[in-house]
Amino acid sequence: MQKTLVTIALAASLGLGATAAHADILSDVKAKGYVQCGVTGGVPGFSAPDANNVWTGLEVDYCRALAAAIFNDPEAVRYTSLTSQERFTALSAGEIDVLSRTTTWTMSRDTQLGISFVGTMYYDGQGFMVRKADGIASALDLSGAAICIESGTTTELNAADYFAANSLEFNTVVFVDQDEVVKAYEDGRCDVYTTDASALAAERSKFAVPADHVILPEIISKEPLGPVVRAGDSTWFNIARWTYYALLEAEELGVSQTNVDEMLGSDNPSIKRLLGVEGDFGTPMGLTKDWAYQIIKHVGNYAESYDRNVGPATPIGLERGLNALWSNGGLQYAPPIR
């Protein structure tokens, strides 16, 4: 948390908040022909490159959806791998157009860094992973255990709060980079690895024997993860936000990558508006009227992206849970397009 505050103060001191110099991001993006998207160095299921440097993941799909909305081309994206310490400075300095990198939406970030959170692509929470052989069944058994944590994240404060609230001895081993944290845990330099539960599942999937590691049942924080843009450009913010909403609205209306062309003939007024058959909701944002059709055609809806990247049938194996649509008991909800 201390480094988080330092980062915030540094950004403020450097004037890296909303700047007029980046007031027309859409024009800049159109001129260069691609979206520069800030991502993690490699969290399977969320953003990670393969051996051919082809990026995939839920957060990558968001970047691809943004490119599809603007260019009708989901491949019009370039990816910048960023650490937790680099991400906000890179966004504020204009090195990237959007940050789509397992970033928790907090009040201090939203109000002090000159950035704006677009929405919550993934509702997460912080958890703990331990070796199965250690026989630990609860986070309440972790007093005095060596805990590997990445600096510059909300993880440190959450863990400190949890251990203090439960009168547990807090013993951390802090690293700058997520890869260093994982390696330290694998090398036995610490007993516990803590971060967002989704990231724990993602990293566990890469271990030689994933079943040798257990994610404890306690979730100790709220971690709403979502894309972020620079503040001060309402057009770019609207494009980023409604790209996210279009993914959700398509799922709710049953419009998928497979049936989107068929759905162009639907009599449902909501589907007509979503696909640009009726009304024009793209032009006011500087896009074409079929902007959402292009997203669905090229990337699919939210459920399709979730299922292929992190869903139960993937090595990550995450149930929808809070990330189900509101109509299915979850928190994902898109305002109507009208």
Image (spheres, grey):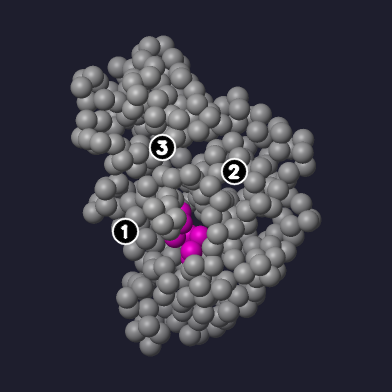
- The quadrant in which residue 205 appears is top left
Determine the residue positioned at 68% across, 40% down. 112
Q: Position of residue 121 (x, y in %)?
A: 45, 53
- In three-dimensional space, the C-alpha distance between marks 2 and 3, rounded to whole angstroms, equals 17 Å
Horizontal arrangement in the rendering, residue 211 relative to residue 121 (left or right): left
| Tag shown at residue 196 | 3
Say which amino acid is labelled 2: Arg
Say which amino acid is labelled 1: Arg
Q: With respect to residue 45, does 152 lie above or below?
A: above
Horizontal arrangement in the rendering, residue 45 relative to residue 224 (left or right): left
In the rendered image, residue 336 lying in the magenta stretch gets the answer: no
| Tag shown at residue 283 | none
Q: With respect to residue 282, does 240 lie above or below?
A: above
Badge 2 or badge 3: first in the primary sequence: 2
Range of magenta residues: 59-65
What type of secondary structure mainly makes up the magenta span? helix
Badge 1 or badge 2: first in the primary sequence: 2
Determine the residue positioned at 49% across, 23% down. 174
- In three-dimensional space, the C-alpha distance between marks 1 and 2, rounded to whole angstroms, equals 26 Å
Residue ID for mark 2: 87
Residue ID for mark 1: 308
Tell me the element at label 3.
strand
- The quadrant in which residue 12 appears is top right
Determine the residue positioned at 40% across, 21% down. 147
The answer to whether residue 323 is seen in the rendering is no
Say which amino acid is labelled 3: Asp
Q: Nearer the viewer, mark 3 or mark 1?
A: 1
Tell me the element at label 2.
helix
